Image: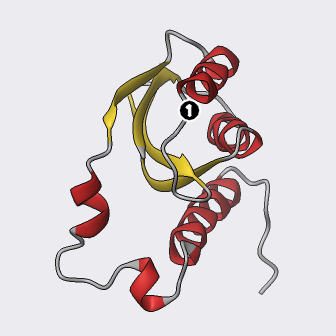
Amino acid sequence: GVKLELRTSDRRGLLSEVTRTFRENGLLVTRAEVSTVDGQAVNTFYVSTAAGNPVDPKTIESVRSRVGVAALRVKEDAPSSYQNCNGGRATDAQTGLGGGAVLLSLGSLVWRNLYNLGLIRSYS
């Protein structure tokens, strides 16, 4: 996978726009670190292809042109040891999760942000 760092002014819908762009270009977010510092979005995404193959540099450039070349930087290739070193935990292949836990986590993050923005209401 590839580590991408996004630094830009925070705005409504930014996370949704970026993750949609990744998805439209066939990339899977395997890990995300999302924060805001003094009105600046400081996000780090670890992405790979859905099949787990190396990411094509042309795909990364396509994403950068859509999100903003100055805002999205390729920091490094995520080391393969990252995928194999989970602090003693079982890998997705061993558990049969296939990335579902990551998607659930990302979905929860998006839902919580939409809820906090008042775009989703709870009637329970």
Hey, which quadrant is residue 60 in on the image? Answer: top right
Measuring from the top left, give residue 93's x and y in whole percent: 45, 81
Measuring from the top left, give residue 37's x and y in whole percent: 36, 31
Is any part of residue 35 visible from this angle? no
Instruction: Using the image as rendered, state which of residue 68 and residue 119 is in the foreground.
Output: 68
How many discs mark residues in the rendered view?
1
Question: Which kind of residue does numbered mark 1 sit on?
Answer: Asp
- The 10 Å Cα crowd at callout 1, few under 14, some 14 to 19, many 20 or more, is few
Q: Residue at x 79, y 67 (%)?
A: 121
Q: Residue at x 59, y 19 (%)?
A: 61
Instruction: Using the image as rendered, state which of residue 93 and residue 31 is in the foreground.
Output: 93
Q: Residue at x 36, y 79 (%)?
A: 91
User: What colour scheme was applied to this rendering of the protein?
Assistant: secondary structure
Q: Residue at x 54, y 72 (%)?
A: 99
* Quadrant including the C terminus: bottom right
Q: Is residue 112 above or below residue 11?
A: below
Measuring from the top left, give residue 22's x and y in whole percent: 65, 40
Is any part of residue 59 visible from this angle? yes
Hey, which quadrant is residue 88 in on the image? Answer: bottom left
The answer to whether 49 appears left or right of 21 in the picture is left
Q: Which residue is mark 1?
A: 56
Name, please, the residue furthest toward the top. Answer: 70
Q: Label 1, secondary structure: give it.
A: loop
Q: Is residue 113 above or below residue 97?
A: above
The answer to whether 41 appears left or right of 10 in the picture is left
Instruction: Using the image as rendered, state which of residue 12 and residue 91 is in the foreground.
Output: 91
The answer to whether 86 appears left or right of 97 in the picture is left
